[in-house]
Image (spheres, rainbow, N blue to C red):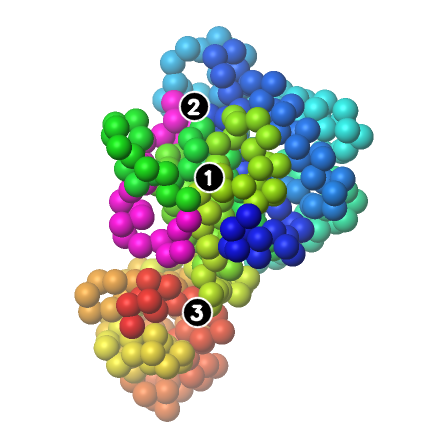
Amino acid sequence: MSKEREKIFKDARRILVKIGSGVLTGNNGLDREIIENLVDEIADLTKQGYQFVVVSSGAIASGRHRMGFKDKLQSLPEKQAAAAVGQGRLMRVYSNAFGKHDLVVAQILLTMSDLTDRTRFLNTRNTLSVLMEWGVIPIINENDTVAVEEIQFGDNDNLAAMMANIMEANILINLTNTEGLYDRNPKGAKKSRLIPLVTDITDKIEKAASSEADPVGMGGMKSKVIAARKVTAFGIPYIIAAGKRKGILHDIFDGKNVGTLFLPMAEHLTSKKYWIAFTLRSRGKLYIDDGAVNAIVGQGRSLLPSGVLEVDGDFNVGDPVSCVDSNGVVIAKGLANYGSQDIEKIKGLKTSKIKQVLGSHPYDEIIHRDNMAVSKRVQRSN
């Protein structure tokens, strides 16, 4: 066992496992043998004291097979209809497989709007905590049947990254149909090499990840590396491994050098700042001067009106907005204390002028530091 893996699994108890469509499905729809193998492993590890949450793909692929469609579905209504057919079948397979081990499963279907609202976010966390305390295995998927573009996660890699924050996971294991991350696309390169350990997700690492998606899935390796960047920013280790390999979870927990391990960042975001950075979608942009950039990135300060040059977008108090430097780089995201119309009036001014212009002075800051997440890429470059 490597020192990195020994350290990770020494105190790990809450485990999030994401299982992709390429793992769960075969030529005849859901691959029940694969599912039962994985469930057997999760059940065994659960009885050893680990708590598991599963983010599972497969509903659309299952529904498509049940309806006898050979080609990949193209339109959103077709995919949503297939998900409606397949989700019940997927849960039945999980329920029966875990039932053999006297374990109960719970179905949780989410859309992005369930997590962008802070109250619903916390309610989801509380529900998961109770289920895990009861020894129940939550099975989570995007609510594909009702999700539209504005409230979609994009793929289950992104959903899993968000769930890792919600459940405060000790590790996220992403099971896919490849052995891990290669230095180049293994499908087109004879000399591709598996990368066993990633200590820092550099641009080179991101370029090594192919965006080619599995025929039955939504994302490719690129989406998994993007998810790894988010998860490790919260201080959670992340492993990409081959889900069809029998005994894969036991191998991982035994410390065997399988898959690709992404180490967490030493300095990581709090849960709230992770939520701001990676769950909320910006409603606008604030272009700020170099002095404000230095204050935010170099000195850990809030954004004041004097540092704002331009306002882009129509947003309200409390909405998430991005802070952009003179090179067009997003250096931070935060919750605005003022709406866009008021910021337009007070941009460039000292805080002492706020009441004179607006008639009131509720805050000194446009974005308070406690409600701001600074880009880790920007921090690394300074």
Please tell me whether mark 3 or mark 1 is closer to you in this view: 1
Q: Is residue 301 magenta?
A: no
- Residue 115 visible in rendering: no
Query: What residue would you read off at disc 3?
Result: 372
- Please tell me how crowded label 1 is: few (under 14), some (14-19), or many (20+) other residues with Cα within 10 Å: many
* Residue 124 spot, x, y in % from top left: 64, 49
Residue at the bottom extreme of this rendering: 352
- Please tell me how crowded label 3 is: few (under 14), some (14-19), or many (20+) other residues with Cα within 10 Å: many
**Circle number at residue 216:** 2
**Circle number at residue 159:** none
Give the magenta range: 197-218
Q: Residue at x 39, y 18 (%)?
A: 72
Image quadrant in which you'd find residue 373: bottom left
Please tell me whether mark 2 or mark 3 is closer to you in this view: 2
Q: Specify which label sits upstream in the sequence, 3 or 1.
A: 1
Residue at the front extreme of this rendering: 1
Residue 355 sits above or below residue 293 on the image = below
Q: Regarding mark 2 in the picture, which secondary structure is present there?
A: loop
Query: What residue would you read off at disc 1?
Result: 259
- Please tell me how crowded label 2 is: few (under 14), some (14-19), or many (20+) other residues with Cα within 10 Å: many
Looking at the image, residue 188 sits to the left or right of residue 223; the answer is: left
Q: Specify which label sits upstream in the sequence, 2 or 3.
A: 2
Q: Are marks 3 and 1 in contact (CB under 8 Å)?
A: no
Amino acid of disc 2? Val
* Residue 248 spot, x, y in % from top left: 56, 33
Image quadrant in which you'd find residue 208: top left
Q: Are marks 2 and 3 in contact (CB under 8 Å)?
A: no
How far is disc 2 from disc 3 in space, using C-alphas? 37 Å
* Residue 19 spot, x, y in % from top left: 53, 33
Q: In front: 238, or 330?
A: 238
